[in-house]
């Protein structure tokens, strides 16, 4: 039995890579006793990714609302969280004068790309399911009949 196949190859690589990076960051901190900027940045990216995927994955709960409203509210919740995190962080580490703008752009651009990919995949799945339902409703298609 193949555990990794063509359908889960890329997610498996991404999961493995993420685990390796998190292990590397932890080991560097334990061995060196220092927490550098790049380590913090990678960890923040990981946490923000979890938050973004968590919020995106909840879209099905709001199917009764227009999709544009759901997307805008999701974005506002996330960017509000990012800005709140940035504001709280400023109490513990020095903040660059363009810190808020940089965090806004660093989050918004990848998130917008991710939203397009995510909802594109959702639309593709819905269209595939609708096509299958039409085929079932219309009867067994010619290419599935036994000879």
Image (cartoon, grey):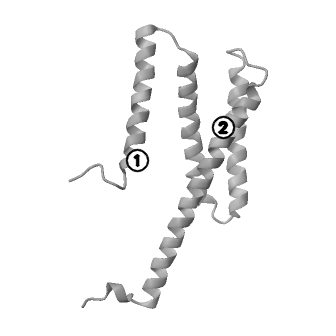
Crowd tier of the residue under label 2, counting other residues whose Cα lies within 10 Å: few below 14, some 14–19, many 20 or above: some
> Which residue does the image show at 46% across and 87% down from the upper left?
137
Please tell me which residue lies in front, 120 or 133: 120
Please tell me which residue lies in front, 108 or 33: 108
Crowd tier of the residue under label 1, counting other residues whose Cα lies within 10 Å: few below 14, some 14–19, many 20 or above: few
Q: Position of residue 87 (x, y in %)?
A: 73, 25
Q: Is residue 138 left or right of residue 146?
A: right
Q: Is residue 3 left or right of residue 52?
A: left
> Which residue does the image show at 67% across and 49% down from the upper left?
74
Quick one: which residue is furthest to the top in this view?
A: 33
Residue with the mark numbered 2: 107
Up-down: is 94 above or below 103?
A: above
Q: Position of residue 84 (x, y in %)?
A: 72, 31
Give the mark toward the camera: 1 or 2: 1
Up-down: is 84 above or below 8?
A: above
User: Residue 38's image quarter?
Assistant: top right
Q: Secondary structure at mark 1?
A: helix
Quick one: which residue is furthest to the right in this view?
A: 97
Q: Quadrant of the C terminus?
A: bottom left
Up-down: is 127 above or below 103?
A: below
> Which residue does the image show at 43% across and 20% down from the upper left?
26
Q: Which mark is residue 92?
A: none
User: Residue 107's image quarter?
Assistant: top right
Q: Are the residues at dot 1 and dot 2 in contact (C-beta closer than 8 Å)?
A: no
Q: Which mark is residue 10?
A: 1
User: Residue 122's image quarter?
Assistant: bottom right
**Mark 1 vs 2, N-terminal side:** 1
Q: Secondary structure at mark 2?
A: helix
> Which residue does the image show at 79% across and 21% down from the upper left?
97
Q: Position of residue 112 (x, y in %)?
A: 66, 48
């Amino acid at each position: 039995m193949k555990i990794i196949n063509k359908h889960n190859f890329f997610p498996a690589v991404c999961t493995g890579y993420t685990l390796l990076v998190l292990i590397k960051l932890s080991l560097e901190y334990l061995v060196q006793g220092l927490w550098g900027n790049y380590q913090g940045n990678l960890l923040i990216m990981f946490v923000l990714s979890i938050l973004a995927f968590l919020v995106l994955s909840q879209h099905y709960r709001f199917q009764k609302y227009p999709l544009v409203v759901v997307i805008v509210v999701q974005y506002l919740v996330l960017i509000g969280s990012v800005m709140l995190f940035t504001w709280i962080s400023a109490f513990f580490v020095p903040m660059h004068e363009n810190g808020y703008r940089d965090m806004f752009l660093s989050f918004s651009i990848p998130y917008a790309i991710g939203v397009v990919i995510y909802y594109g995949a959702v639309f593709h799945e819905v269209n595939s399911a609708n096509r299958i339902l039409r085929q079932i409703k219309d009867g067994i298609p010619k290419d599935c009949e036994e000879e």
